[in-house]
Amino acid sequence: MKVRQRIVFLMLCLGMAMTSHAQVGEHRNDLSVGFNAGYVLSNVSFQPKVGQTMHGGITGGFTFKYVCEKYFKTICAIQAEVNYASIGWKEEILNIHDAPVINTVTGLPEEYQRTINYIQVPVFAHLGWGKEQKGLQFFFQAGPQFGYFLSESTKTNFKVEERNAEERVNNNVAQDTMVVEHKFDYGIAAGVGMEYSHPKIGRMMLEARYYYGLGNIYGDSKRDYFGRSNFGNIVVKFTYLFDLIRTKRK
């Protein structure tokens, strides 16, 4: 746990250091606000391992971006979001021949999916290269992300007591009946993308992002079943922003 906390702390320090370093460049005072929407592919890294495919869900919310300086050709900013995200895991239930396990009661391939809804708040150090006010800009951003549990739901086509346990190659099933224990989630997110800006229509951003969770959704002590149960998310997101404050330029 201490190692994870140190990683988050280092990412926060990195963001603050980049912001403070920005003071030696050309000053900017640009504030943009808007909204974002996207699609999330997620899973949970369980230890012991649980076979999975990617869980698909939606995400969306509000975006705030503050540009504080231009250092040589690098446009330095801080970007923060407040998002709703529907994430979780989808189990891949196979037999020793890598074929779907057929439930003996329903006669159908067994399916199990858990959806967990969060409010997520990422805070990024944002670096861009290209046009500031009219044209295309490429960017990279990274920083910590925090999440708070809202609700969870399960989708399955069999009863827990009627699962076909004999044919499963992986018989780790404790997670199927366990509720989320840790409501607070945290980790590191990073992404790359492009932004098109125009004074009359605002700013449009398209980004691909990855989130690695440093916290576990279940207990990870020696007495607990899982030693690890952290999220991994792949996000594709569109963001639209409009300027509230803009640095006056000649």
Image (cartoon, rainbow, N blue to C red):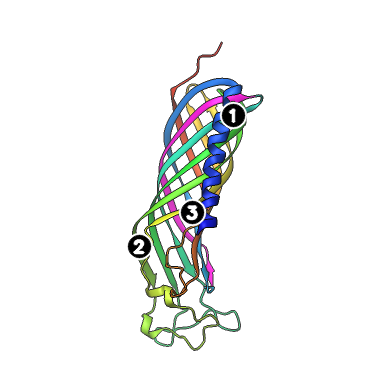
Q: CA distance from mark 1 to mark 3?
A: 33 Å
In the figure, 172 relative to 188: above or below? below
Query: Where's the C terminus, which quadrant?
Result: top right
Read off the residue under disc 1.
21
Viewer-side residue, 95 vs 228: 228
For discs 1 and 3, the disc positioned in front in the rendered view: 1
Tell me what residue is drawn at x 54 percent, y 51 percent.
6
Q: Is 68 part of what is drawn in magenta?
A: yes
Amino acid type assigned to the residue bearing label 2 in the image: Glu
- Please give the range of residues in magenta: 51-71
Q: Earlier in the sequence, mark 1 or mark 3?
A: 1
Helix or strand or loop: what does disc 2 sit on? strand
Give the image location of residue 139, x and y in percent: 60, 36
Q: Is residue 245 visible?
A: yes
Q: State the mark number for residue 40.
A: 3
Q: Are marks 3 and 2 in contact (CB under 8 Å)?
A: no
In the figure, 181 relative to 64: above or below? below
